Amino acid sequence: MIDVAGIIAENILYIAMVTIGGMLISWSVHFVPVGGAPAAMAQATGIGTGTVQLAAGAGLTGLVTAGAVMSVSDSLPLVAASGGVGAMIMISVTMIVGTWVYVYGVGVPPASAKVDYDPITKDRQDIYVSQGTEGHGLPTVSYVSGVIGGALGGIGGSVIYFALMSTSTGLSQSDLVALASIFAVGIFFVNAVIPSYNIGGTIEGFHDPKFKKWPKAVLASFVATLMCAFVGILTIGGL
């Protein structure tokens, strides 16, 4: 006899996991130092590309790592940790290479215009900011913030992927992997776009005044991800 109550409870758990993962992704985006086009010209602190691209890059790396681990283990802590580490490595490499370009290519020191002293190293920054810019490069506080953001995004994406892969379904393993990956990537992009509107351009990290706006984005992501979770879990579970 089919345990209907057990299946419903299980699906509710997976929907909750997907929703929490989406909220973690949304929160993580606020940590990643994004400078956009101004940063590409060394006129703003951060990486010279958009919020969504950076978040998706770190998150997808985490998903790939989590997927590899899930092929040999069904431990949620291990899968989440591997996804977090994978995303951290990706964003760390991106930031360090960006710093090399700024320092040795453009010839500017990493400095933030948001704070006079780096909150971590306590080094003075305001005297190194070029006139007419919002800073340049990736100072220590922005780098550390980006690593934290990568970890949160990778963990969030891994939790989503784990929940989708754990859903009871009649699909073959290969089809389940494909469908879970599609839904996980889609949910990740949804939760990468929402914070980008909340940030509205550039952000340096957790020391940036814009960081305080994160609760609004996380709340919006809760609503959006909850709907995505229903669709994803019920679709996979019904196949």
Image (cartoon, rainbow, N blue to C red):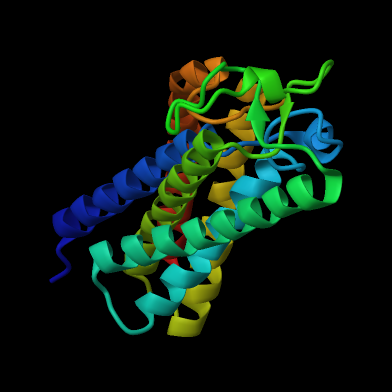
Q: Is residue 150 left or right of residue 55?
A: left
Q: Is residue 116 left or right of residue 113?
A: left
Which residue is painted at 74% across and 21% down in the image?
Answer: 134
Q: Nearer the viewer, residue 169 or 197?
A: 197
- Image coords of residue 143 (percent x, y): 54, 43
Which residue is painted at 65% across and 30% down in the image?
Answer: 111
Q: In the picture shown, does residue 44 fall above or below 82?
A: above
**Residue 172 makes an appearance in the image:** no
User: Which picture quadrant has residue 46?
Assistant: top right
- Image coords of residue 129 (percent x, y): 73, 23
Q: In the picture shown, does residue 211 fall above or below 145?
A: above
Which residue is painted at 47% across and 54% down in the image?
Answer: 232
- Image coords of residue 19 (percent x, y): 38, 42
- Image coords of residue 159 (percent x, y): 36, 56
Q: Is residue 56 left or right of residue 37?
A: left
User: Which picture quadrant has residue 57?
Assistant: bottom right
User: Which picture quadrant has residue 209?
Assistant: top right
